[in-house]
């Protein structure tokens, strides 16, 4: 957990500094209005990375890495059902390949 928190802290410092330098007060106004959303995103991102690191201590790294890519499937489903996007056939094929890979990992 310590590694994850330091990683996000140190890698997260340059972007806000650049935003403040380039946009100034507009960034601060936006941050004041939307801080709960930013906090939820930060906690969610940190927690998901920490869980992935923990999983890599419990299972082979290659398997955990491959299964992390299955999040693309959730993004596809969100785009279809929530955002009502039209998905090209090639993307459905790519999603089917991901499902096939997950099944191959599970059955192996």
Image (cartoon, rainbow, N blue to C red):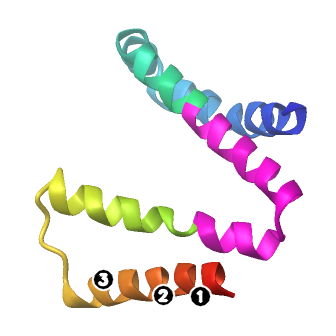
* Residue 25 seen: no
Instruction: Check the image and report above or below for 32 versus 92.
Output: above
* Residue 100's disc number: 2
Q: Which residue is drawn at 77% across and 76% down?
A: 62
Which residue position is annotated with label 3? 91
Q: Where is residue 46 in the image (x, y as percent from the top left)?
A: 66, 36
Q: Earlier in the sequence, mark 3 or mark 2?
A: 3
Residue found at x 73% / y 36%: 8
Nearer to me, 46 or 9: 46
- 59 up-or-down from 48: above or below: below
Query: Could you tell me residue 9's position as x and y percent?
Result: 76, 30
Q: Are marks 1 and 2 in contact (CB under 8 Å)?
A: yes
> Which residue matches tag 1?
104
Image quarter of residue 58: bottom right
Q: What stretch is highlighted in magenta?
A: 44-68
For the residues labelled 3 and 1, the Cα–Cα distance comes to 20 Å
- Residue placed at 40% from the left, 67% from the top? 73
Mark 1 vs mark 2, CA separation in Å: 6 Å
């Amino acid at each position: 957990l310590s590694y994850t928190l330091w990683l996000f802290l140190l890698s997260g410092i340059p972007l806000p500094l650049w935003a403040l330098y380039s946009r100034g007060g507009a960034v601060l106004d936006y941050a004041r209005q939307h801080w709960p959303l930013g906090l939820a995103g930060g906690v969610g991102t940190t927690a998901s990375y920490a869980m992935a690191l923990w999983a890599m201590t419990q299972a082979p790294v290659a398997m955990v890495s491959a299964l992390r890519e299955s999040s693309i499937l959730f993004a596809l489903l969100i785009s279809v059902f929530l955002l009502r996007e039209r998905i090209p056939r090639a993307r459905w094929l790519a999603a089917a390949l991901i499902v096939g890979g997950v099944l191959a990992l599970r059955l192996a």
